[in-house]
Image (cartoon, rainbow, N blue to C red):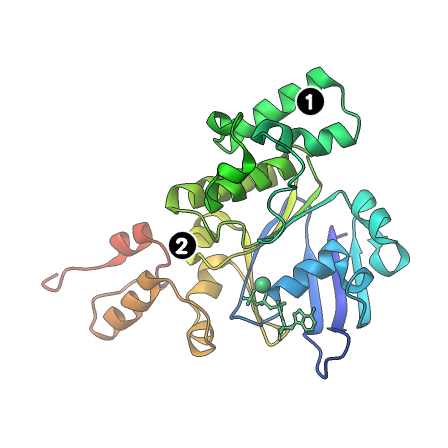
Amino acid sequence: MAFINLQNVTYQYPLTKTPVLQNINLQVNEGEFVAVIGPNGAGKSTLCYALAGFVPHFFKGEISGSIEVAGVESSKSTLDEWVMNVGLAFQNPFNQISGAKYTVFEEIAFGLENSGVPREEMKARVEEAMKLTDISDLADRSPYSLSGGQQQRVALTSILVMQPKLLVLDEPTSQMDPIGTREVFSVVRKMAEGGMTVVMVEHKMEWIAQFADRVIALKDGQILLEGKPNEVLTSNILAENGFGVSRYTSTAREAKKQGLWRKENLPVTLDEAVEGFVKRDE
Ligand SMILES: Nc1ncnc2c1ncn2[C@@H]1O[C@H](COP(=O)(O)OP(=O)(O)OP(=O)(O)O)[C@@H](O)[C@H]1O
Ligand SMILES: [Mg+2]
């Protein structure tokens, strides 16, 4: 059975007139890395809230259908039970730093400390996690002295150190440069290979194409398309529906009209583009 199983999920925030999630059916296997894309207001964050249990437990509103993760049904759990039983961790752009700690090291150790992990083990796990996300050199800094991108890396590290079963990330690289972004994607990929299930909202098509197993394209609260990254990200349907499209895809789509792109699939990444373009005199 799928690790995540959403059946006919329709949800409406309190005091609003139309549902922001409409009849969502989604199954995700254990260890799968799924990227969620969509224009502003599509319902991406709301979908994350549904997985995180905030919808409906915190935001209330009207919900129908069923949300099940790891065999647990959301409507039958409290928010605390849900987070525990599902083994969930959620990072969104607004809850980056706890504010309770003076150093990055302590910030990352915070969750382990709260769950009573012995000091030595805690230290080893924090150091290992910091190595993974390449922030070891920030260990003694104050979380508040960091750039937005560094803070996002610290936030991700403090989640990974807890070894969640389900990781939900809402635009975790929004403030990061290309190097940070690449590292996040490759760390997340590695975690998925280790069995962690990942749902990640992202706009960066080139990285999604290289690292994700599957892409879900959301629009107006509905799943417009889903499938393999290259198929979804190069689809005309995306271009016609206000989704961001990789510059390599749009360039090759134009080039195809002039016979300069002869491969069956359009590219999403630079490498795919370089490989597929033909010289005019060929
Ligand atoms: N707490 C709330 N109460 C009422 N409506 C809300 C609430 N939060 C979001 N919405 C509405 O729900 C819809 C979906 O919002 P959501 O934040 O899920 O979209 P999104 O795809 O994450 O957009 P963005 O790309 O801007 O982050 C929007 O129309 C938004 O205005
Ligand atoms: Mg959002």
Amino acid under label 1? Met
Which structural element holds mark 2? Answer: helix
Vertical relation: 276 (above or below) 123: below
Residue at the location (81% across, 65% down)?
66
Q: Nearer the viewer, residue 48 or 245?
A: 48
| Label tally | 2
Q: Position of residue 60 (x, y in %)?
A: 81, 67
In this rendering, would 55 be left or right of 250? right
Q: Position of residue 195 (x, y in %)?
A: 65, 39
Q: Which residue is disc 2 drawn over?
A: 206
**Ligand 2 under 8 Å from disc 1 Cβ:** no
Residue projecting furthest to the left = 281
Q: Is residue 110 visible?
A: yes
Q: Which residue is disc 1 drawn over?
A: 122
Quarter occupied by the C terminus: bottom left
Q: Residues within 10 Å of mark 2 (few under 14, many from 20)?
A: many
Q: CA distance from mark 1 to mark 2?
A: 35 Å
Which mark is first along the chain, 2 or 1? 1
Q: Position of residue 223 (x, y in %)?
A: 61, 71
Residue at the location (32% across, 68% down)?
250
Figure quadrant, ligand 2: bottom right
In this rendering, would 80 be left or right of 219? right
Q: Residues within 10 Å of mark 1 (few under 14, many from 20)?
A: some
Which structural element holds mark 1? Answer: helix
